[in-house]
């Protein structure tokens, strides 16, 4: 999902977006200090197969690991990468150590799984106010691949 396009449409800075949820007909966007807004899918550019391939290449370039098995196609992100991207302290890094962060290629959505639910990691929010998906998307936006 292109966070920059959504932020531009809402006339806000990208870092102000806390969470984006894909609903059936609209995007539900939570904005820090403002509240929630609904955004039409029509503002997003159409995704082509080449764009998807480039996205996967970028994810692998930043440290993601692609896994394809049992009808699933995902790119997993190591908790250390997430900690580095979010500039988390050592204690926060230990808190997310048991979580699995991934991008589901089939659905086009970011998700996380808990091996064990740890204190401070819930609802895709780490440390209470930092959204890991937004951080990864911002990193992908500035990553170049051939």
Image (cartoon, rainbow, N blue to C red):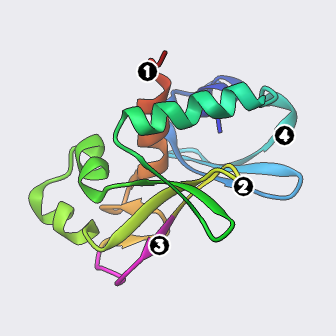
Residue stretch in magenta: 112-119
**Residue 101 lies in the magenta stretch:** no
Kindly indicate whether the residue at mark 2 contacts the one at mark 1 (C-beta within 8 angstroms): no
Query: Which quadrant holds residue 2?
Result: top right
Could you tell which of marks 4 and 2 lies nearer the N-terminus? 4
Of discs 1 and 4, which sits in the foreground?
1
Could you tell which of marks 3 and 1 lies nearer the N-terminus? 3
Left or right: residue 41 versus residue 28 is: right
Q: Is residue 3 visible?
A: yes
Could you tell which of marks 3 and 4 lies nearer the N-terminus? 4
**Residue 114 lies in the magenta stretch:** yes
In the rendered image, which residue does mark 1 sit on?
A: 142
Residue in the picture at 78% in, 28% down: 48
Q: Is residue 6 visible?
A: no
- Which secondary structure dominates the residues rendered in magenta? loop
Mark 3 vs mark 1, CA separation in Å: 26 Å
Kindly indicate whether the residue at mark 2 contacts the one at mark 4 (C-beta within 8 angstroms): no
Q: Position of residue 52 (x, y in %)?
A: 67, 34
**Toward the viewer: 41 or 109?**
109
Kindly indicate whether the residue at mark 1 contacts the one at mark 3 (C-beta within 8 angstroms): no
Q: Position of residue 114 (x, y in %)?
A: 41, 77
Left or right: residue 107 versus residue 140 is: right
Mark 3 vs mark 2, CA separation in Å: 16 Å
In the rendered image, which residue does mark 2 sit on?
A: 107
Could you tell which of marks 1 and 2 lies nearer the N-terminus? 2
């Amino acid at each position: 999902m292109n966070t920059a396009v959504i932020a531009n449409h809402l006339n806000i800075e990208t870092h102000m977006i806390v969470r984006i949820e894909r609903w059936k007909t609209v995007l539900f966007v939570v904005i820090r200090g403002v509240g929630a807004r609904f955004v039409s899918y029509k503002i997003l550019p159409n995704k082509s197969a080449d764009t998807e391939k480039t996205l996967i290449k970028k994810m692998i370039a930043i440290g993601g690991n692609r896994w394809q098995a049992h009808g699933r196609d995902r790119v997993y992100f190591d908790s250390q990468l997430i900690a580095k991207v979010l500039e988390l302290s050592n204690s926060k890094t230990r808190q997310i150590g048991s979580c699995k962060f991934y991008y589901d290629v089939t659905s086009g959505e970011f998700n996380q799984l808990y091996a064990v639910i740890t204190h401070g990691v819930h609802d895709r929010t780490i440390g209470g106010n930092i959204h890991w998906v937004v951080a990864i998307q911002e990193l992908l936006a500035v990553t170049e691949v051939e």
